[in-house]
Image: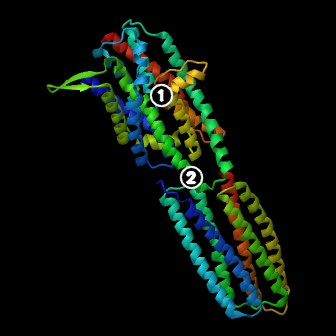
Amino acid sequence: MLKNHQKELMESINSFLDKILEISSLFKKLLENYFNKNFQEVENITEQISNLESQCDKIRREVERKIYQETLIPNMRGDVLGMLENLDKIPGQIQANAHSFNTEKPVIENGLSQNFLKLCEHAMECIALLIEGSRNFFIDKKVTIEKCLQVSEIESKADKISTDLKKNIFSNEKNGLATKVHLRYFVEIMDEVANLSEDVADRLIISSSKN
Amino acid sequence: MLEIFLIALLAILVGTNDAANVFGSAVGSKMLKFKFAIIFFFVFIIFGAVINAKYPSGIYQNLLANYPVFDQIYLVLVPVILITLISLKLKIPSSISQSIIFSLFGFALAKSFNFNHNLFLKLIYFWIVTPVIAFILSIFFCYLIQFVIRIFKLNIFQIDYQIRLCLIFFGCLAAFALGSNLTASIVGIYSPFLNLDFNFFNSKILVSETKLYFFGSFLIGLGALMFSQRIVQSVGSQISTIKPISALAILLTQIIILLSFSSDILIQKINTISPFDFFAIPLSASHITFAGIIGVASFNKFREVQPSHSMKIIISWFLIPCSVFILSYFISLFF
């Protein structure tokens, strides 16, 4: 009851957040390698992402168990639990995206690849802002709200790019319907990362305002 | 033996009623588990009683010029026990010390004894003033704690740890302060007759002042251990939702007020700087706790206050002393 768990808990939470950032940057590397047709490297990165995602799950469970077992932060543990669980959906989504690229190998023309990379960069930016907001949730809630509001702005930019991408895909007469639907699916799953970040940011804003 | 039985009964009632005043906010805010809280309460209430209880106890003999003879004290205690039982049944915290003094007043009036009205008025004045002070102090402590947290830029786990430690430390200190107040409330009525000699199945038992304080406080702890769990756990929800910072602010308020009116050293120090003459009196911890909770609720603009229960408690502050007075008056008239 009197043991101070703050250091190990904050270390675990920071390591969880760092791993999400690492997964996010690995996915960009995966895309670059994919467009360079370096498929062996894509497979290696997919494996790295999977490992990191499993580590995230493990850390999240440990933190949640410790918070509840030691009855820590009683008035905020629901919010912290919600934040960790929602954040954990992001590496899950990126892992699924990486597996989809690795196994389905969609045919993406050179003209579209730049927009795919841009979409990925915006998603990365959303994640980076969200992680900064999440770190500050434990110290300064004003900063959390500020960062989370910025996530929405970046997510709107990502939405715009995904809409442009879909337009380009469906206006291309060379591709058949199956290819169009296949490519649209990839645009949607990549955009989903930014959408998930926005959802988590919205929840964090509410939790920060409440506390 | 009737006297010892009445003290024991009253002590158990006090333990059931008053454990919530010390650790209720900490347990209610889920910062402390009930079993740990009660262990701390048990130990420190005994320390407080043995070291400090003699100071506020003296108030009872100063109230009556013709103090009731030993055999008549039950006339004072029975109305208090009856009314406390009813208020516990209604889940309303009551002030035992206040009830005893109003019962003494009823008794004195019925028996045409001289009653120290000046002292009685001073007591009423302090009973009115202390909840007001508690209300203001709890708001001040809420601001102070939040200010300290902001200055040190602690993360929520550090805040949680520091508040938990403070709640235990100050909870023990509050139990110490309350130990003298509560034991004085239940044993103090016998203070003119300390040391007591009892015959128990042909064997003589000598009860000294310290032994009596120990006995009273031990039974208070026992009452808390056996019957207070539901009341302690409901403190955090019945009047208002209590957050950890609020719990600490309430506890600090209680300690400041209770120690200011029970510790002889502190009273002497306060009197050197205060324009008013402070003296050791048994205060109502329930009133202080309630006012503290309302104070921290005002800090949150009363958003989480349950008005019906709060009104019930405020009304009981007037109804309980009046009921005790009336009951004591009529019982003393007929017996």
Respond whether the residues carrying marks 2 and 1 are from the same subunit: yes
Name the foreground residue: B218 vs A99.
B218
- Residue B57 seen in the current view: yes
Q: Position of residue B185 (x, y in %)?
A: 40, 25
What chain is tagged by disc 1?
Answer: B
The residue at 71%/78% (across/down) is: A25
User: Which residue position holds label 2?
Assistant: B160
Please tell me which residue is depicted at 67% across the width and 77% down the height of the picture: A23
Decide if residue B29 is in sight here.
no
Left or right side of A3 for A109: right
Q: Is residue A130 left or right of residue A175?
A: left
Q: Secondary structure at mark 2?
A: helix
Callout 1: SS: loop
Judge by depth and name the residue closer to the eye, B39 or B244.
B39
Give how far across and how far down residue B294 sits, in percent. Answer: 59, 35
User: Which of the chains bears the disc numbered 2?
Assistant: B
Quadrant containing the C terminus of chain B in the rendered view: top left
Q: Are marks 2 and 1 in contact (CB under 8 Å)?
A: no
Give the vertical position of A165 relative to A44 (above or below). above
Marker disc for residue B313: none
Residue at (69, 89) in percent of width and height: A42
**Amino acid under disc 2:** Asp
Q: Compare residues B110 and A28 and report the one nearer the observer.
A: A28
Residue at mark 2 to residue at mark 1: CA–CA distance:
31 Å
Tell me if residue A119 comes above or below residue A40 in the rendering.
Answer: above
The quadrant in which residue A35 appears is bottom right
Q: Earlier in the sequence, mark 2 or mark 1?
A: 2
CA neighbours of label 2 inside 10 A, class few (<14), some (14 to 19), many (20+): many
The residue labelled by disc 1 is: B263
- Pinpoint residue B98: horizontal percent, then vertical percent: 45, 22
